[in-house]
Image (tube, grey):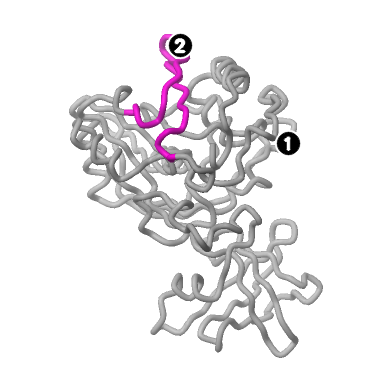
Amino acid sequence: MKTADFDFRVPERLIPLMPPELRGERREHARMVVLRRAEKRIEHDRFDHLGAHLRPGDVLVVNDTLIVHDQLRGWNRRGAFKLILFGHHADGWYAAVRPASRARPGLVIKFGYGELKAELLKQTIGDLWLVRFEHDPIFDFYELIMEHGERNLPLYKPMQERMDAYDNVYAREPGSLEIPSAGLHFTDELLRRLRREGIKVVALTLHIGLTELQRYRHIAEEEVEDHRVGAEWYRVKESAARAINGARRRGGRVVAVGTSVVRALETVAAETKTGTRVRACEGWTDLYIYPGHRYKVVDAMLTNLHEPRSSHLLLVAAFAGREFTLEAYREVVRAQYRFDLFG
């Protein structure tokens, strides 16, 4: 399958660089395009009308990961260093080191008064290193990351004043380096309203790293099948698995909020004699979903509009079909919808 078959043009003006609140807008008033794949029908609505497209008994599955700082300034006897985090790995973290010329295996960088340390293990993808952190056990690791770190991307410069504008209202578990942005449109009031209408809301956790960063979302390979996505850590608790399986058993639909939830749910789906069930477990997933994937538990999804030639776009095309997905994308570009994280 050719990657070029998923190419189209998105004008830069349709890719906002700040979340709605910092643009003077309400997050729940975002425009929403609805793809009804069975009827091949495209509808236009607003996000706070979401309940009209759901049914009592449906279960809305969200990702409760919380973004953390991704740039750390440290030191050792050789001078000052900067560590830029790009994602988790089963054996540590992926990180870029500055200055790169002084990076070598075994190098230890200290942060603060030494209560947090990072050892460079080996060079991996491009200029990224596999890094192992050690910290004083009296401190929480993520509290140290937040204390000694800051956001690296220019996108986040206004963040210090309005941190809440960059978080999902249900974010609880620190560990992501990017926002699971489909959830940014929810407010506490909208979630309460959906619950009153009989929609169950449950959370899982998937810490976002490499797959959400633009350089790894974009597919450079000519063939779709040759692309790979980075592994990310997830956890599905027993209570969440029980709620999802119960809703499916009673005829409710599983509605995934964001591509991270889709990947986690499809990873933990297990075939049994009585049908497909969601398993309670935790681990690492490098599941790459593209056309040809057979969805096991996800019945509907909420997701932002994705850029061309991206792994996220292919995940949507695997669900709705390539032609129908691209038809909808051409329509929303004409209608001036906003794309990507803050669209």
On residue 41, which mark appears? 2
Left or right of residue 198: residue 37: right
Distance in Å between CA atoms under marks 1 and 2:
32 Å
**What span is in magenta?**
26-50
Task: Look at the numbered disc 1 and give the secondary structure of its residue.
Answer: loop
> In the picture shown, does residue 258 fall above or below 232?
above
Residue 14 picture location, percent across and down: 63, 32
Marked residue nearer the N-terminal end (1 or 2):
2
Q: Residue at x 60, y 63 (%)?
A: 85
The crowd level at tag 2 (other Cα within 10 Å; few <14, some 14-19, many 20+) is few
The one nearer the camera, 16 or 300, is: 16
Magenta span includes 140: no
Q: State whether residue 65 is above or below residue 192.
A: below
Residue situated in front as seen by the camera: 202 or 118: 202
Q: Which residue is mark 1?
A: 221
Question: Vertical placement of 72 versus 191: above or below?
Answer: below
Q: Residue at x 53, y 19 (%)?
A: 321
User: Which residue is located at x 74 percent, y 75 percent?
Assistant: 104
Q: Residue, x 62% and y 77% (percent of image)?
A: 119
Q: Amino acid at mark 2?
A: Arg
Q: Position of residue 316 (x, y in %)?
A: 52, 28
Q: Within 10 angstroms of label 1, few (less than 14), some, or many (20 or more) residues? A: some
Q: Position of residue 151 (x, y in %)?
A: 59, 62
Where in the figure is residue 107, as x and y percent of width and height? Answer: 69, 80
> For residue 117, what is the image quadrant?
bottom right
Q: Amino acid at mark 1?
A: Glu
Of circles 1 and 2, the one toward us is: 2
Q: Quadrant of the C terminus?
A: top right
Give the farthest residue toward the top. 39
Residue 185, quarter of picture: top left
